[in-house]
Amino acid sequence: MSIILGLDIGDARTGVAISDELGIAAHPLCTIRRKSRKALLAELQQLVTAHNVEQIVVGLPLQLDGETGTQAKKVKQFAEKLEQQVNLPIAFWDESFTTFEAARILHGTKRRRKKRKQVIDQVAAVLILEGYLEELRNSKRKGQVNECE
């Protein structure tokens, strides 16, 4: 398997997570404050190069009815630019409720509220990447046939 980067793209911040080489686990990497689209693209390019990333999965904020809303369209437009910049395949993963789930997870920790806010996007990116990795593992299992001798 290859190293995959998971992204939770927001207007102000982008949470970044990274998989291990086996595609088993996702780990928080960093949160990037968005200064401009160009600066964010450059920072993501640096991460891709530094970590030998071979694929990117981007959280897509679909509406409750599964439709693509304004925010999802903005994320898709950014992902198109990112794909051109890094020349890697980009997959989308439904990120519904990941930020809410990340907040719930962090609420139980002893981190101060300000510190939780700084890492919430990373945790959301981990949840996006974990969901994607699980789907990859499940699809590989379905394609495998266990033969008995």
Image (spheres, rainbow, N blue to C red):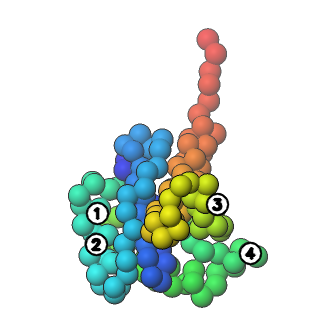
Dot 3 lies on which element?
Answer: helix
Give amino acid for label 3: Arg
- First along the sequence among labels 1 and 3: 1
Residue at the spot of label 4: 64
Spatial CA span between label 4 and label 2: 31 Å
Residue at the spot of label 3: 104
Give the foreground label among 1 and 3: 3
Residue at image position (37%, 77%) is: 33
Residue at the spot of label 2: 43
Look at the picture and state if 35 lies above or below 111: below
The image quadrant that residue 28 belongs to is: bottom left
Give percent across and percent down for residue 142: 64, 39
Residue at image position (64%, 60%) is: 104
Residue at image position (37%, 50%) is: 3
Give the foreground label among 3 and 4: 3
Q: Which mark is residue 47?
A: 1
Give amino acid for label 4: Leu
- First along the sequence among labels 3 and 2: 2
Local packing at callout 3 (Cα closer than 10 Å; few below 14, some 14-19, many 20+) is few
- First along the sequence among labels 3 and 4: 4
Give percent across and percent down for residue 107: 61, 60
Whether residue 24 is visible, yes or no, is: yes
Whether label 1 touches label 2, CB < 8 Å:
yes
Give amino acid for label 2: Glu
